[in-house]
Amino acid sequence: MKFKVATGCDRGLCGGGCCKQDHQLNTYDWLADVVSDPDKTDLVEVQFKNTRKGYYHNVNNLELKKGDIVAVEASPGHDVGVVTLTGRLVSLQIKKAGLKSADEIKRIYRIAKPVDMDKYKEAKRRENGTMIQSRQIAKDLGLKMKIGDVEYQGDGNKAIFYYIADERVDFRQLIKVLADTFHVRIEMKQIGARQEAGRIGGTGPCGRELCCATWNKNFVSVNTNAARVQDISLNPQKLAGMCGKLKCCLNYEVDCYMEAGKKMPSKEVVLQTLDSDYYVFKQDILAGTVTYSTDKNLAANLETISAERARCIIEMNRRGEKPATLEVETVKKEPEKPVDLLANADISRFDRSKRNKRPDRNSGRSERRGHNGEAMRTRSQENHREKGNRRNRDRGGRRENAPSQSHRKED
């Protein structure tokens, strides 16, 4: 089995094409790397304006890949669309679409030529004006219907009018007037509000593009029971989507909630304890917890326990036993006190380390300063002593040389 390197366009991620939003309902081709596939078929999926798709036989064995613009068989004439899927996965898509008869699968004529593209673009330019004019015609005829979109065939010989109506509408007179006005073959298709939202497109409250405009093609009925199972508030403004109907995403997780809800205790059962009776206040299905209140209608003395604990109390009540409290009775452990790592440490140890390092550089200086100071003090003392001795000698000399008073009187 051989393989090749597939690009994003080959796998269904290509953004080019002839349609306005050709990425809608794209299927990721995880078999695009397989070259010699024994189960490969000549079936090709082609997408037209917005969400309309068709399946065709590649009878001419054209080398087609995703994003190629092709001319396909139509009745009458031909149509122009973009290839969105090839290979084995197309057979699965046909089963999903519910095509039972092989006659519904037509042929691919060729890759679109410049002449085909010119006719296609000219037909597309007429769509908006045709839709506005057809709405006025339906209003003049007094028909209770809304024409939501108009799609011209690639060769311009046929136009499909998509309309929405709550009741059955007799549009035979409308078809005659439209055929005389636009001189094309007319086909009327009734769509629902969800299909209209998918064709128009938009952004949902989640911030992403609408599911009906990107991947969701089979619409399943949605009711308010899905919101009740998921404990969602029954607010019409929040539950309604862009189409005005209930959001399709309400059905995405309902199975998971229903499976988890089987493990939850019944809301009607009252838990009896030695303190009081407890009633269900609210449930968190995914977390598996139940909040009980001592008052049936108000939030009083709220206690949250696990669903498993609630079932244990229910079994105890059936045996005639009553626990002391709703919570599991366990020996309370004293909380561990935080350990202070610096409790017996001396913070000044960092300063000491610095002081011990500095004397290495200044020890000589300090010693020199000490010796110099002692020498200076010694010298000053010696000088002071010498001066004192000198004064004493001078005084002694003066006393010896001075005559006494007795000698003066005798003289």
Image: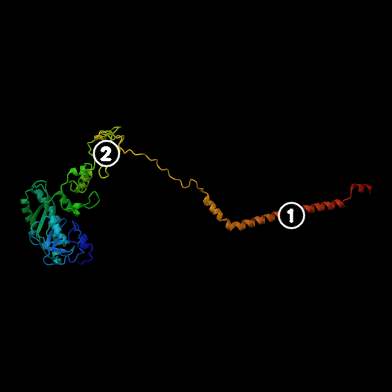
| Residue 312 circle label | 2
- Residue 46 seen by the camera: no
How far across and how far down the image is residue 66, in percent? 18, 62
Classify 22 as above or below 305.
below
Between residue 202 and residue 43, name the one nearer to us.
43
Q: CA distance from mark 2 to mark 1?
A: 105 Å
Q: Callout 1, which amino acid?
A: Glu
Residue at x 71% of width, y 54% of height: 378
Q: Callout 2, which amino acid?
A: Cys
Residue at x 72% of width, y 54% of height: 380
How far across and how far down the image is residue 158, in percent? 9, 58
Between residue 130 and residue 302, name the one nearer to us.
302
Which of the 4 quarters of the picture holds residue 268? top left
Which of the 4 quarters of the picture holds residue 265? top left
| Residue 382 circle label | 1
Nearer the viewer's eye, disc 2 or disc 1?
A: 2
Q: Helix, strand or loop at disc 2?
A: helix
Residue at x 81% of width, y 53% of height: 393
How far across and how far down the image is residue 100, in percent? 9, 56
Pick the quarter of the image with the N terminus.
bottom left
How far across and how far down the image is residue 307, in percent? 26, 41
Q: How many marks?
A: 2
Residue at x 63% of width, y 56% of height: 367
Q: Helix, strand or loop at disc 1?
A: helix
